[in-house]
Amino acid sequence: MTPAARTAIEHSDIIIGYKTYLDLIDELLAGKEVVASQMMKEVDRCGRAIELAAAGETVALVCGGDPGIYAMAGLVFEMLRSRDLAVAVEVIPGIAALNACAARLGAPLMHDFAAISLSDLLTPWEVIEKRVRAAAAADFVLVIYNPRSRRRVEQLVKTRDIVMAVRGPRTPVGIVTGAARENERVELTTLEQLTECEVGMQSTVIIGNSQTCCWRNLMITPRGYAGKYAV
């Protein structure tokens, strides 16, 4: 959490969020009106936040990571636009999963990368697969969000196979689960062995490009300095 996010919560009258996320900031909720909901209730949360803000309340809508990356900021603006409501919204940056996980792994995102969610709840798998193929062929480092759930297991296998068709089986892969939380787990593996690793919805998978290497349990993607300077 950034200091700005903490300040925003402290200065808000009402805190709204997914219960699991609110449990992580319990110490900031004392004396606040709290509206918690379960997973899959994003539209309800955003709608309630808009309703209360339009009534003059100062509302903090809590997200995991950064609110503008696979989170609630976009949905809030979509709903405001569809209703043509002029409600003041401030998006407070957070630490996105790709930042937190990259830091735990070393420096895997030092060159061009693409973030792709494997969740097909809102995006058809055919579209996701097209994006994976394009990013893999362009030699982007891949940051995979929502890689696997209990009911959705084949997407990660298919992604691994797509990438391995254009990159070697020994391509480094980093898996970070629960970054910066009590259950944090960091694992370095290879593209070939990826599907044998423990991966869940709290995991973010970073697949290296053709130049990514491992050194002393770190994952490093060169920026290109060695080809131009003495390093």
Image: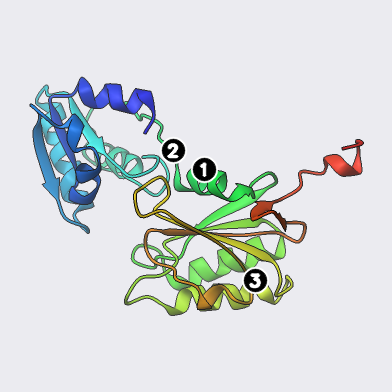
Question: Toward the viewer: 96 or 177?
Answer: 177
Question: Toward the viewer: 37 or 138?
Answer: 37
Residue 136 placement, left or right of 29: right
Question: Toward the viewer: 217 or 162?
Answer: 217
Q: How would you rate the neighbour count of disc 2 (Cα within 10 Å): few for under 14, some for 14-19, many for 20 or more?
A: some
Which residue position is annotated with label 2? 95
Asked whether residue 87 is in view, the answer is no
Which residue position is annotated with label 1? 99
Residue 187, compared with residue 220, is above or below; it is: below
Q: Position of residue 38 (x, y in %)?
A: 16, 55
> Residue at coordinates 52% horizontally, 78% vertically from top-left?
196
Tell me which amino acid carries mark 1.
Answer: Asn
Residue 93, compared with residue 178, is above or below; it is: above
Res. 177 image quadrant: bottom left
- Tell me the quadrant of the picture where the N terminus can be found: top left
Q: Where is residue 139 in the image (x, y as percent from the top left)?
A: 72, 59
Asked if the residues shown at circle 3 and circle 1 are in contact, with their CB atoms under 8 angstroms apart, the answer is no
Res. 76 image quadrant: top left
Asked if the residues shown at circle 1 and circle 2 are in contact, with their CB atoms under 8 angstroms apart, the answer is yes
